[in-house]
């Protein structure tokens, strides 16, 4: 009976871990797509800003000074981006996952190896219970 309780606890922990990973992966995918779209829009906006600066500086600085002024502005923007990247690289790494979850997953793996038939029956039962709740009406 104690082994079955440990198995149930391990299954709940594994479900919690797997559910968090799936949701995190979904959110990460959406975030990556949004970042790529925002990056494309930012590049287009930067191109428009450079063109506008060039047009504005042409009568003020002349045909040689306008490209130099725009190049200087782009150089300043590049330095700002490099400073941001430097700060990101110096950020502290994230902490390791909680040791309790790792221990529970290891215990679940040990139980699966020792009691294969019971695990298959439990997995079949869990699948049937999960499937019964999601029937279309």
Image (cartoon, helix red, strand yellow):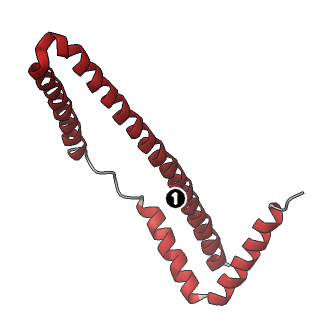
- The image quadrant of residue 91 is top left
Residue that sits furthest to the front in the current view: 63
Element at badge 1?
A: helix
| Placement of the C terminus among the 4 image quadrants | bottom right
The residue closer to the viewer here, 9 or 79, is 79
- The image quadrant of residue 55 is top left
Image height of 104 relative to 53, above or below:
below
Image height of 17 relative to 38, above or below:
below
Image height of 127 relative to 47, above or below:
below
The residue closer to the viewer here, 17 or 59, is 59
Residue that sits furthest to the top in the current view: 60
| Placement of the N terminus among the 4 image quadrants | bottom right
The residue closer to the viewer here, 121 or 65, is 65
Residue 37: give x, y in percent of width and height.
45, 41
Q: Residue at x 54, y 76 (%)?
A: 108
The residue that label 1 is drawn on is: 21
């Amino acid at each position: 009976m104690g082994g079955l309780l440990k198995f149930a606890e391990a299954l709940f922990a594994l479900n919690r871990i797997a559910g968090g990973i799936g949701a995190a992966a979904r959110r990460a995918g959406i975030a990556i797509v949004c970042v790529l779209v925002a990056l494309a829009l930012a590049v287009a906006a930067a191109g428009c800003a450079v063109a506008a600066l060039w047009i504005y500086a042409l009568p003020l600085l002349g045909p040689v000074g306008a490209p130099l002024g725009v190049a200087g502005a782009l150089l300043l923007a590049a330095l700002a981006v490099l400073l941001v990247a430097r700060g990101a690289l110096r950020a502290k790494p994230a902490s390791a996952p909680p040791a309790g979850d790792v221990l529970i997953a290891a215990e679940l793996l040990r139980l699966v190896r020792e009691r294969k038939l019971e695990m298959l029956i439990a997995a079949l039962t869990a699948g049937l219970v999960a499937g019964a709740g999601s029937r279309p009406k």
